Amino acid sequence: MSEKTPFYITTPIYYPSGNPHIGHCYSTIACDVVARMKRMQGYDVMFLTGTDEHGQKIEKKAQELGTTPKAYVDEIVDNFQKLWATLGITYDRFVRTTDDYHIKTVQNIFEKLYKDGWIYKSEYKGKYCTPCESFWTESQLVDGKCPDCGRVVTDASEEAYFFKLSHFAPKLKELLLDEERNFLNPKSRVNEMIHNFIDPGLQDLCVSRTSFKWGIPVTFDDKHIVYVWIDALTNYISALGYMNDTYNDYEKFWPADMHVMAKEIVRFHSLIWPSILMALGEPLPKKVYGHGWITFGEGGGKMSKSKGNVVDPFVLSERYGVDSLRYHLLREMVFGSDCPYSNEQMFNRYNSDLANDLGNLVSRTVAMAQKYFGETLPLQKEFNESDEELLKLTDELPSFVDDAFTTLRFSEGLERIFRVIARANKYIDENEPWILAKDEAKKPRLAAVLYNLLDTVRRCTILLTPVMPHICPEIFEQIGAGEDVTTWEASKTRHLLPAQVAVKKGRVLFPRIDIEKELAELEALSAPDRELPEEPLKDVTSFDNFAALDLRAVKVLSCERVPKSDKLLKFIVDDGFGERQVLSGIAKYYEPEQLVGKTLAMIVNLAPRKMMGLESNGMIMSVRDGDRFRVVEFGDDIKAGADIS
Ligand code: ME8
């Protein structure tokens, strides 16, 4: 027996700095479709996804929430995994950069690159975008700001290790321009990489940091942690067992057949990643695909968690079906381009393609087979020349769809399948089965027409299975197609349904969506719940009462828990005139050391009072945030004693 051919496909590993959204779904569904299709075609597939859990952003978020980075990411990673389960994502492995085996690989690689002279110690000076964790050269900034997110960058300088990326510039250019190899797709990204990055001069890459702690320690210099890209990109081989003992799949699956991602991280995958691999002496991935962004709202822009315009994929798949969401995303997005997301567009597409074209074709055909033949078609089949157009169009589908899906041109592949489905609906109108049924002598022809229709549905449905894996089996059941005639290979051959095929009417597969009604309901769902604040509004008071309060910014000099109290923290603060002691009931929400050095808001002229035997002189102000309270704080530039009015 011949060994199955391995096929290795990867999504980016996502940052668990916020919950997954439709954008993450797109890349993951795209990879799932390719993985499912390759499995159907008999490949031995490894489909890898995961999460990229280190970095300053996550460290900061966890700190703000008063939790540890690991506890913080655990919860979000769980949401990613729940979403993938909901969407029917058949990944084979899920890598987390906090997994021990991954850490081992990163440390081993870093050590090897250092020993081999590809990593050296120096001083980093440059422009740094904290939210993006990216360094930029002056020439890459747009209006002096981060070209990715448009935010302010700062001058940064610190001791750091560097990877000799500049050395690889000529080889990278050769790789990108190699027509036959066709490494990076779409082609437009090749020009971007060369003009924006290689030609202006590739800088060596800073690969370690000392300014935060949440990362993988450099084994031979523990002040440093490995900075994001060596940690992140390495997931593609750590998860196969490269330089670790947990897995043993590197020989079999590397080099990857395709890395899939959106355009903003193509740079890292097509320049940095190949260079790291070249430095390690390892083969390069076969293809890198950088798709466009799903954009949202007027003016587009990458859908971002921070802009709060996220459509909840859990809600959409629950209400309209997982397969409808999968279909919609893949059908709308033209590979390489950005694509605005709108619920209205999804409903229109659903009604026209799924309810009208596919749903109707299946239900009409099955209903006619039932009505005219009582479910089982008779043996005799009178095919004729007029059937050829439909059959030929269907014959061309499998290789077209294979090529389209493998190169992420899903919309083209799906459009072609639905062209055949539309042709089949037209074939019904041309052949007028209801007229044939009136004449007993025409029953054999009627049987042939219905058989052709059922068989066309069979072949189209096979090709749709990777995209709509939940609903296609139902279609097979309705048209009486058993497992042997629903393999990928079987889509290539005409007339494989049994001669006396028996249909079975089932539920309406794609009930029409009442667009106005659904839009209104979604709107209502997404409107933020207007929760009433817990404290009702107080009676009006005079201006003098307000003016009598002395509100100031104060600097926290020390902070500790009050013994035997689970509520109270004891602060010594500088109020601009001197030091004072104040107590605050926020011990449940903060570790004392988190608050030292902060500048907080305080009422300083409240009469002293005693709690747990200690005197409190004033009140630190905090604001309710759900179940917790957060202190009201100012930036370092506000001086202790500054009055608040
Ligand atoms: O960049 N449209 O993680 P990330 C389409 N950890 N795709 C989108 C999208 C959108 N609006 N939003 C996100 C990282 N994506 C790094 C990757 S890989 C070694 C490290 C998808 O959570 C798309 O695939 O910001 C994009 O490249 C990726 O999520 C970015 O995910």
Image (cartoon, grey):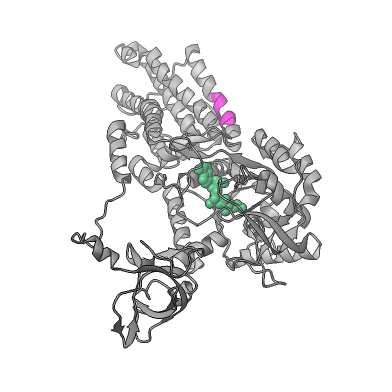
Q: Is residue 115 left or right of residue 489?
A: right
Q: Quadrant of the C terminus?
A: bottom left
Which range of residues does the magenta coloring cover? 395-401
Q: Position of residue 22 (x, y in %)?
A: 45, 44
Q: Is residue 526 magenta?
A: no
Residue 29, can we see it? no
Residue extending furthest toward the left: 539
Q: Residue at x 52, y 31 (%)?
A: 411
Q: Is residue 432 above or below residue 92?
A: above
Residue 313, compared with residue 606, is above or below; it is above
Percent across and percent down for residue 86 are 41, 50
Q: Is residue 401 visible?
A: yes
Judge left or right: residue 274 versus residue 361.
right
Q: Nearer the viewer, residue 98 or 590?
A: 590
Quadrant in which residue 492 is drawn: top right
Label the magenta part by its dominant secondary structure. helix
Q: Quadrant of residue 397?
A: top right
Question: How many numbered callouts?
Answer: 0
Report x, y in % for residue 123. Answer: 74, 62
Seen at 41% across and 30% down, the residue is 349
Pick whichever, 621 or 125, lies toward us.
621
Q: Residue at x 50, y 12 (%)?
A: 385
Q: Is residue 360 left or right of residue 299?
A: left
Left or right of 270 in this view: 552:
left
- In terms of depth relative to the viewer, which is nearer, 381 or 5? 5
Q: Residue farthest to the bottom?
A: 613
Q: From the top left corner, tell me how far across and down residue 418 is, in percent.
A: 47, 26
